[in-house]
Amino acid sequence: MSELKPSDKTKVAFPAELVSDLLSTAVLILDQQLQISSFNAACSAVLGISEKRLSGQYFPSLFQHCELGKEPLRHAIEQQKSIAISDVQTILHDGHPTLLDFYLTPFNHQQQDYLLLEIRQIDRQRKISQDNVQQHQHHAARELVRNLAHEIKNPLGGLRGAAQLLESSLDEEQREYTQLIIAQADRLRKLVDRLLGPYRPPQQKFANLHQVIEQVYQLAMLDNASAVTMQRDYDPSIPVFRFDPELIEQALLNIVRNAQQALQQGGHILLQSRILYQHTLHGQRHKLVAAIKVIDDGPGIPAEIKDTLFYPMVSGKAGGTGLGLTIAQTLLHQHGGWIDCDSWPGHTEFTLYLPISDTEDAL
């Protein structure tokens, strides 16, 4: 029997619908009135709308806001000209902003003009790249602050010691000035210690994460001058696992208090816990990860500080030290975790990711 050559193999014909439904890119066909004539399965995930609602819809109505507008779509059909438009800011029907790439390809079918529309969601890829950059920048900033802090502490100690020696040889009236020097040196030393962050490694033990979140909730309610409404939504499937309850409480409390201060005159904060499966942190995939979300309906984080939000001395409020988020991020790093933030007007969402390695059930 002769060997079967590649050209002799039977070719399998796959339906076009099957191929398009396997794509992660949303593909739609619009008619001349910009109504949806056909779409693939990915459209529902990318646009956040059920397949039932997509059928026959006027395409621009799928968004609360879309920078693309309808004119480029009509122009592409009328001029029979393909267009690629990148980084289009949109707000989906559920109010969630997302960044999309659009590829417009006009074609003619049965003497009718149509537009093939490909939509790619680029937030996820950009977010991964952004997180990697932020991780490197966070490490670099922490190292710089640590070196500067040590350089500041040494002369501060000398100044304080000299002031104490001088104080013993001065009269009562002149001692007022040396006491001022000592007080200011102590104040600067405390600020430097805060810049350095937690000085002890995590004391990990088996603990219940929801007890920690509940403790933060109780503390926040005691200090609730703005009358913020607080709610909890816990995932009971999160097991007891090893972490430092005190450090995680400090990190979470910093973020909750920031949210309270941002709301000022009322508003809502949601404390939510979820368990994630096969989640990647710092390039390492974890079988289980606990996610704690702090969600508020405040004004959102100013655009000019979004990319440097976790840097030391960066603050969106007047008189803020800009250390709360830096310390919180450092505390999560000590656990192999990470803090992420998504924010737009009316919605700010901080997520604390905490890897679950040893669980009490595994013992």
Image (spheres, rainbow, N blue to C red):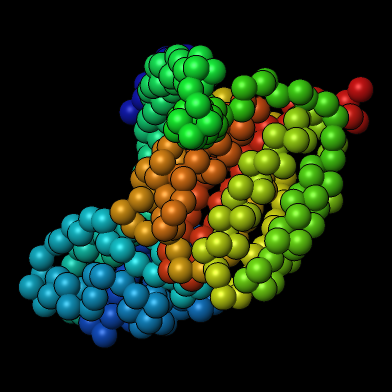
In this rendering, position of residue 89 left or right of residue 254: left
Percent from the top left, x then y, of residue 222?
A: 76, 61
In this rendering, position of residue 104 left or right of residue 222: left
Percent from the top left, x then y, of residue 277?
A: 68, 39
Quadrant showing the C terminus: top right
To which quarter of the image does residue 88 belong? bottom left
Seen from the viewer's position, the closer of residues 166 and 56 is 166
Would residue 235 be visible to someone looking at this image? no
* Residue plotted at (39% across, 75% down): 63
Rendered position, 176 above or below 297 = above
Percent from the top left, x then y, of residue 41?
A: 49, 61
Seen from the viewer's position, the closer of residues 314 and 233 is 314
Percent from the top left, x then y, of residue 342?
A: 48, 54
* Residue plotted at (57% across, 25% down): 284
* Residue plotted at (62% across, 22% down): 199
Rendered position, 328 above or below 166 = below
Rendered position, 264 above or below 281 = below
To which quarter of the image does residue 151 belong? top left
To which quarter of the image does residue 34 belong? bottom left
Seen from the viewer's position, the closer of residues 264 and 127 is 264
In this rendering, position of residue 133 left or right of residue 80: right
